[in-house]
Image (cartoon, rainbow, N blue to C red):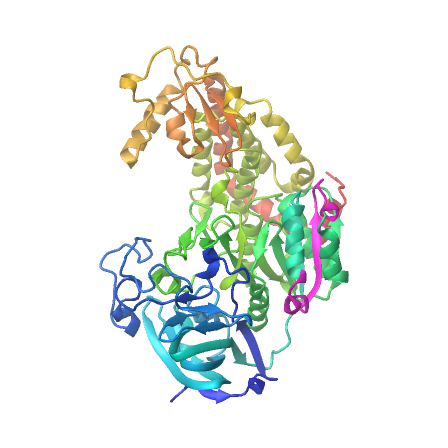
Amino acid sequence: MSEAATAASPSSVEDGFRVVQRLVLPADQELDVQSLYVSGITSFSSGGDSMSRQSGGDYEPTDAKDADDDDDDSSSSEGGAPGMSGFGRITDGAGVAVDPHRRVTLGTYFNAFPASYWRRWTEFGTVRLTARVRGHGSVIVYRSTAKGHVVRADSSRIDSEEPTTLTFDLPLKPFIDGGWYWFDLEGGHGEFVLEDAHWGFETDKVRSGRITIGITTFNRPDFCVPQLVNLASNPAVLDIIDEIVVVDQGTNKVVDDPGYEAAAAGLGNKLRIIEQPNLGGSGGFSRAMNEAISMGASDYVLLLDDDVVCELEGIIRAVAFADLVKTPSLVGGQMFSLYDRSVMHAYGEAIAKYRWFWGPVAPSVHGHDFSKKSLRQTSWMHRRIDVDYNGWWMCLIPTQVIREIGLSLPMFIKWDDAEFGLRAGAHGYPTVTLPGVAVWHVPWTEKDDTLDWQAYFHERNRLVSGLLHSPYPHGGKLVRESLENHVKRLMSMQYGTGETILLALQDVLDGPDRMHHDILHRLQEVRALRDDYDDGKSEPELDAFPAPRRKKLEKRGKGIPVPSTTIGKAKMAATGLVRQALPTRDLAGEHPEGIVPHVDQRWYRLAHFDSAIVSSADGVAASWYRRDPGQFRDQLRRSLKMHAQLYKEWDELAERWRSALPELTSPERWKLTFEGLDDE
């Protein structure tokens, strides 16, 4: 057989060979994550793995809708990723035992091999799969195409109770646009056991790069300390770590947590805690970057949020990939939901350049549930996804890149990771978000940080990053969208948020000189500003507010609708805008006109209230919004003036910000900020 399976001894993995991906199985055995690692296969009939796709035929979807529409197709090949029940079990030795005449697949998120990424970003032409098996059954190797078609690549049958090592040398040539390799295990007349498996390459680059892990934390020792314990539990990960730098910026200290002593004992001199003023994510991660380049030993800095749960094998995979790429690259991890652990929340991120806003890279989608639709059934996931940046929930950055382009901008939070990725790309250092490298993280769907004090940083940092990197005259649609966003806040009675947006806009117009000053002081000033507005005040109980009342009842008792069509939304927006010129209704100042759950608080709907109780995104509190025509007119007047100035002076401002960028991101300037010094 060409490139067929051949028996080999375990010692065949030796000098001149680099393992880049090992078999990994869920430690806790909980069913909600099992589909990410291993799954039984019920059939190969229609649906996601139709016979034409299984054989690599000319299958095409019959309409424009992507195959990943998450419909419940009862004929789909894996029955919604059934897990291992009735197919086999995960062994005590972290292997897989397959029941007789059953089939189990490793064509899963954590155990399939993302061949197209290795094809695109490295110079290898062949990958080697090595599997150690025993018993009675077959190993069947598959590959997929960028269209999601599945092709049988190779196979080998085993009938021996003695462990046998199989190797498959598999070409990477067909993967220019996308595709994965994986293998299935099929039981014969007796139990079939996979003891171990790995993927790797023949190379002289066998030494693993060294890393400094940087964790920024703020009052989350209950998350941060278990993460340290987790890191201490894996000798293979510890072996490549120079240092773990925890930048503690809170008042609830990591070192005071009951579990800290055990974590510190497990990590020994590899752990260092640094306490500094709260400089947000950008200040914490910049401190970790600076510590790494100052020490001079590490090849990479791995940035991790404090509130993530990391699949530790992903750290080793990220380092191996970074060691072997053609060009020094940032290697990012993907994000699963910590609440719903089989749900992939972020697969790949990009900036829509004309709008200048982030979002999922097409054709990927947020919120894919692997428990409902497996990797094999999800056609868009077989495309290679190229990104503009990776979120700093997990991102590996070469220290070489940091030395050349500097640290993060002093943005406090929001857009710092995106701006850094764009800046690195402009210097020739791409970002690769690598499948099979991931963390579980609280998804941003449970937050609405565009409405609280964070609205200032959203607005300012979006505009700053646009001035620095937008390829379009006047930032494309950015200035117009900024104005539209502010008007929507005003129509929603969110005057405190509106005022913070104006403050951010003014700071952008004033130029870059105050950014390091503001990372030390602006948060407190923004919070104080919001305290003067109704939407900046909240109560934990609805009973704290007066009962809803209206002097004039709603027409036909229908209340204010929640439109479902674009035309309906446009009509409500138009009539809501007209309402802003009218006086408020009687009783609106003493009684809310209704209670609006956060899920229904769309701006075009809120524009029809004169007052309303609106709940927060996290469900823990609510605020009483009240319409104020005077506030609306005053903020709108100032907003129009400042946005006109921004549009007119765009080129001049862009030049000022770009000229200041090296100084703003320099370690020397950051050192003053780390020490809490203000040289404004």
Depicted 391 relative to depicted 313: above or below? above
Write down the region rendered in magenta.
Answer: 232-257
Q: Nearer the viewer, residue 218 or 276?
A: 218
Q: Nearer the viewer, residue 58 or 311?
A: 311
Q: x, y percentage for residue 236?
A: 64, 69
Image quarter of residue 253: top right
Q: Is residue 59 left or right of residue 154?
A: left
| Residue 578 is inside the magenta segment | no
Q: Nearer the viewer, residue 324 or 474?
A: 324
Q: Is residue 69 left or right of residue 293?
A: left
Q: x, y percentage for residue 464?
A: 55, 43
Q: Residue at x 61, y 31 (%)?
A: 526
Q: Residue at x 46, y 38 (%)?
A: 479
| Residue 237 is inside the magenta segment | yes
Depicted 6 relative to depicted 34: above or below? below
Instruction: Point out the image quarter for the C terminus.
Output: top right
